[in-house]
Image (tube, helix red, strand yellow):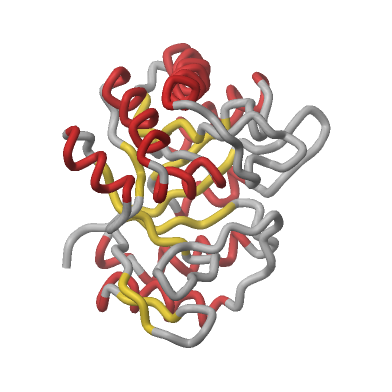
Amino acid sequence: MAKVTINCDMGEAFSIYRLGDDEACMPFITHANVACGFHASDPVTMWRTVKAAKRHGIAVGSHPGLPDREGFGRREMSMTREEIAALVLYQSGALKAYLDAEGLALSHIKPHGALFGMAQRQAHVAEGIADAALALGVPVIGYADCVMSEVFIRRGVPFQCEFYSDLEYDDDGRQIITRQHESVAEEAMVEKVRRAVTEGVTRSVNGRDVKVTAESICVHSDTPNAIQLARAVHAALADWL
């Protein structure tokens, strides 16, 4: 069985507002995707999250989102390829400054929320993300069997295919992006991740087995029982990490 990674979206607090316990999740993940200010986060939060990731020895990548704090980057927007490339570069560059300050390298890019979903279907969005990734010389956490993967393969952008442990899937094998994350039953989630890794399938919301590629497992720090889920995923995948 091929090695897998565990990534977590974090650093999504803002000012006095808190969202999830990022550092408590860090012992159970390999990669942190740090929000960069457009959909969430602020300069102090970004730097604190980078420092925490450094303490735990995990890789840090940017988590660029659409400029929509009110919608938490989970509402689609109409943008050009140039605008997409620019916003990914801008946000990743901001995070890179904090990484430079801590003597760390930018590990990867993982598009956030609606931006990620748009890139699965819209070529110009995927191309814009590829433009930024190639400019920065880093891989992307992406998705299999879609426009995004076709663009990345054609352009030589290295990427890992992601599977969401705590989101539902539709009958096309696409994750269902929700505005808020609900609690997830731990045992069911572990079985779901095991099937995705070992069998390459998951059960859709309509009860169908659909094909997925699970090279990197995502847990969200804003899921109410995120720490328990991250710990359970880490334990379940111990032989493949």
Kindly indicate the quadrant of the structure image that contains residue 57. Answer: top left
Rendered position, 209 above or below 72: below
Instruction: Answer with left or right where residue 214 lies relative to residue 110.
Output: left
User: For this rendering, which residue is in front, 231 or 158?
Assistant: 158
Q: Position of residue 188 (x, y in %)?
A: 51, 82
Q: How many marks?
A: 0
The residue lying at 42 percent from left, 33 percent from top is: 61
For the view shown, which residue lies furthest in the bottom direction? Answer: 207
Rendered position, 87 above or below 140: above
For the view shown, which residue lies furthest in the right direction? Answer: 16
User: For this rendering, which residue is in front, 97 or 168?
Assistant: 168
The residue lying at 61 percent from left, 60 percent from top is: 226
User: For this rendering, which residue is in front, 87 or 105?
Assistant: 87
Q: Position of residue 235 (x, y in %)?
A: 41, 68
Instruction: Answer with left or right where residue 80 lies relative to residue 21.
Output: left
Rendered position, 184 above or below 207: above
Where the N terminus falls, by quadrant? bottom left
Where the C terminus falls, by quadrant? bottom left
Q: Position of residue 205 (x, y in %)?
A: 53, 79
The residue lying at 27 percent from left, 24 percent from top is: 134
Q: Position of residue 140 (x, y in %)?
A: 33, 38
Kindly indicate the quadrant of the structure image that contains residue 201. Answer: bottom left
User: For this rendering, which residue is in front, 171 or 167?
Assistant: 171
Kindly indicate the quadrant of the structure image that contains residue 154. Answer: top left
The residue lying at 48 percent from left, 45 percent from top is: 118
